[in-house]
Image: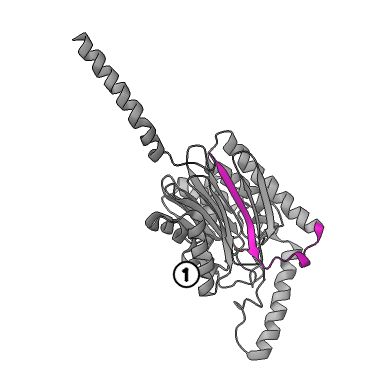
Amino acid sequence: MKTFFSTLFAVSVLLVNCTNPIEQKSDKPQKTNEFALVVHGGAGTILKKNMTPEKEKAYKEKLEEAIKVGYNILKNGGKSIDAVEQTIHILENSPLFNAGKGAVFTHEENNELDASIMTGNDLNAGSVAGVTDIKNPITLARKVMENSEHVMLSGKGASIFAKEQGVEIVDPKYFFTENRFNSLQRIKEKMKAELDHDGKSAFYDPLIKDSKFGTVGCVALDKNGNITAGTSTGGMTNKRWNRIGDAPIIGSGTYANNATCGVSSTGWGEYFIRAQVAHDISALMDYKGLSLKDAAKEVIQNKLTKLGGTGGIIAVDKNGNMVFEFNTAGMYRASMNDKGEAEIKIYKD
Ligand code: ASP
């Protein structure tokens, strides 16, 4: 009997040793990074010839400051949702980017902000659109996701909810920046000239509209394999009629799924909504088995470009691969891997 059990034990040990390595191989795909983080500060006609060294430095420094905040959260085992929210705060609080403090002006000379956030473990999402008095719209989007039974709130109702949730409210004048106000005036002048020329509405003419965007976004994968994506914006200069862009639309401006990837978009919102850019990238990975790089390329360089849309995305997949894809001259962007190595870029290269 004793020999029988010893033999049984030996066989079991052998079996475990033989099968485990194979199981491990198929169960655990090679991770490029245990955790990873990408950030964008908008895409568009960003050309070196129009940039001063000081401006370039200021953008890069702010992107670096932002990404380091998220990196430290992830490195210490924090959640991707906290990394995304805190990273976006830095960009929302800077006048350099078209989100929060630096939001662009509407035709009526107000600021209307949109934001959204999504978590990939539960496909939960929250978003706000057309808010005028919320200092950090990304935080309100998170509150909508976590503390309401809704996905999307807008305008005045979103402000009432913000007050109930103790989210910081500011006087709408907080969003005034001379730079953005002057951009609106320049566009209005060009628009007037264009109207005199052919009598058509020039609102969405890409030659007339602000040629760079400036939305901010962040995608993070944490040590637990959870992906979060978030996007925050002032929308497009000279927008009117309470126009809402892609940034608060789940599947267009933001998407996250732990089984595939997280995506944050920036660009000409109407096209990103029509092309369902963020979800499409995830779906190509999910249904067709494409890599993140190939899926992003397909959606941006083929589908979006054919439609006539301009802009780009940042994304991280479940294995910590980080991707930037855009069809514009530049995109303010940064990435940081699990070793803390940063890549901060503006132009195409
Ligand atoms: N996607 C934003 C919008 O259309 C603009 C941007 O990315 O800067 O509202």
| Residue closest to the far top | 2
Whether residue 280 is visible, yes or no, is yes
Location of residue 173 by image quarter? bottom right
User: Which amino acid type is marked by label 1?
Assistant: Arg
Name the residue rendered at 64%, 40% in the picture.
340
Q: How many marks?
A: 1
Element class at badge 1 = helix
Q: Quadrant of the C terminus?
A: bottom right
Image coordinates for residue 336, horizontal then vertical, percent? 62, 45
Image coordinates for residue 34, horizontal then vertical, percent? 53, 39
| Residue closest to the far left | 1
Q: Check if residue 37 falls in the magenta segment.
A: yes
Name the residue rendered at 56%, 73% in the picture.
241
Name the residue rendered at 49%, 69% in the picture.
303
Compared with residue 103, is residue 70 higher up or lower down, i.e. above or below?
above
What's the image's color scheme? one colour
Left or right position of 53 against 183: right
Image coordinates for residue 277, horizontal then vertical, percent? 49, 63
Viewer-nearest residue: 134 or 214: 214
Left or right position of 28 against 33: left
Q: Quadrant of the N terminus?
A: top left
| Magenta span | 34-53
Viewer-nearest residue: 335 or 236: 335
Compared with residue 165, is residue 107 higher up or lower down, i.e. above or below?
below
Compared with residue 115, is residue 195 higher up or lower down, i.e. above or below?
below
Location of residue 183 by image quarter? bottom right
Viewer-nearest residue: 181 or 297: 297
Image coordinates for residue 299, horizontal then vertical, percent? 49, 64
Compared with residue 164, is residue 285 higher up or lower down, i.e. above or below?
below
Name the residue rendered at 65%, 69% in the picture.
237
Q: In what quadrant does ligand 1 lie? A: bottom right
- For label 1, the residue is 274
